[in-house]
Image (cartoon, rainbow, N blue to C red):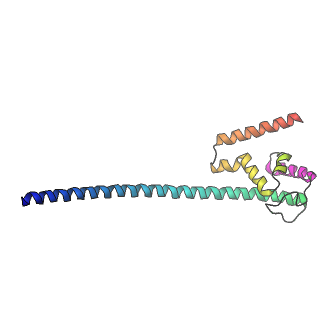
Amino acid sequence: MKDKLYETKAMIALKKKQEIESQILEVNKQIESYEVEQKKFVEQKETLKTQYTNLQQKLDEIEKKIAQAWKEILELEKVGVNENFFDLGGTSMDIIRLNAKFTEIFHEEETIVQMFRYPTIRTFAEYLTRERGAIAAESKVISPDQVNRIKQSRQTQKNKRRSLK
């Protein structure tokens, strides 16, 4: 009888040991899965940081070009990216001159209406990057097909405006 009791206790202990080992294996799998996911997350985070840095650099470049044009047109030494063009003394005639300057700088004609709609350097730079898709295409935020559709749409709008003149 002692042998049977001992065998039963041994079987129970063996079963418990197997259950614990199975749980340990499951936990180890979860930890490995977590580590893989964590590594992917860190890689994605780094990619996003790089893309953001690239976007910010491009936006800064565009803001600098716009600021330089403003300084020339308004004959000012300094302009802030959040200052309103008209609060700095800009007039409707200055907008027309600025439009010609932007066409020269960006090699693409902008509508004067957009210049009224986005009266600060920052908002106009954001508009340009959004509308042109230049920054988005470089950062692969949107597909090249989407960039082409945006460009085609802008060209269609320009053609419509020209036909109305």
Identity of the residue furthest to the left in this view: 1
Identify the residue at image location x=71%, y=41%. Answer: 150
Residue 90 at x, y = what percent? 90, 57
Query: Is residue 22 found left or right of 87 in the rendered image?
Result: left
Query: Is residue 77 found left or right of 18 in the rendered image?
Result: right
Identity of the residue furthest to the bottom in this view: 77
Residue 156 at x, y = what percent? 78, 36
Identity of the residue furthest to the top in this view: 163
Identify the residue at image location x=73%, y=41%. Answer: 151
Identify the residue at image location x=88%, y=63%. Answer: 76
Magenta span: chief secondary structure: helix
- Which of the pair 85/69 is nearer the observer? 85
Instruction: Inspect the magenta stretch and tell me whether residue 79 lies in it.
Output: no
Q: Which quadrant, please, contains the N terminus? A: bottom left
Specify the quadrant of the image occupied by residue 67.
bottom right
Instruction: Inspect the magenta stretch and tell me whether residue 93 lies in it.
Output: yes
Specify the quadrant of the image occupied by residue 60.
bottom right
Query: Is residue 138 found left or right of 152 in the rendered image?
Result: left
Identify the residue at image location x=61%, y=58%. Answer: 50
Q: Which quadrant, please, contains the C terminus? A: top right
Q: Which residues are magenta?
A: 92-108
Residue 121 at x, y = what percent? 80, 57
- Which of the pair 57/111 is nearer the observer? 111
Residue 57 at x, y = what percent? 69, 58
- Which of the pair 23/88 is nearer the observer? 23
